[in-house]
Amino acid sequence: MEQLQKINPEEIKIEIIAQHHEVDIFQSYEKELIDFLREDALENQKQRLSITFLWFYENQLVSYSWYPILLF
């Protein structure tokens, strides 16, 4: 059995999505995840509906997370 390699936390970067990010390279088996990131994430952020964080490992986009912006 192959042993998994530990990830060095210093090789992980988290950034708020911005116009300069190349999100077209992101891949997932879930088409809806790809569509949201490519088509809606930046626009939703501009409209203050949600904020999207891009996760990079070894300078490659590997994941993202988004959170709704709640206004009370």
Image (cartoon, helix red, strand yellow):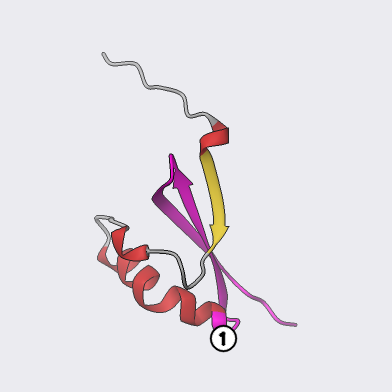
Above or below: residue 53 compared with residue 58? below
Q: Is residue 8 magenta?
A: no
Relative to residue 68, is residue 3 drawn left or right? left
Stretch of the chain drawn in magenta: 46-72
The crowd level at tag 1 (other Cα within 10 Å; few <14, some 14-19, many 20+) is few
Residue linked to disc 1: 47
| Residue at 50 percent of width and 59 percent of height | 65
| Residue at 48 percent of width and 51 percent of height | 55
In the rendering, at what x and y percent does residue 66 appear?
A: 52, 64
In the rendering, at what x and y percent does residue 57 appear?
A: 44, 42
Determine the image quadrant of residue 49. Answer: bottom right
Which image quarter holds the C terminus?
bottom right
Dominant secondary structure, magenta: strand
In the rendering, at what x and y percent does residue 61 appear?
A: 40, 52
Name of the residue lying farthest toward the bottom: 47
Above or below: residue 57 compared with residue 37? above
Q: Amino acid at mark 1?
A: Gln
Of the pair 60 and 43, the residue shown nearer to us:
60
Q: Is residue 59 magenta?
A: yes
Of the pair 6 and 17, the residue shown nearer to us:
17
| Residue at 46 percent of width and 57 percent of height | 64
Determine the image quadrant of residue 41. Answer: bottom left
> At numbered mark 1, what does the secondary structure look like: helix, strand or loop?
loop
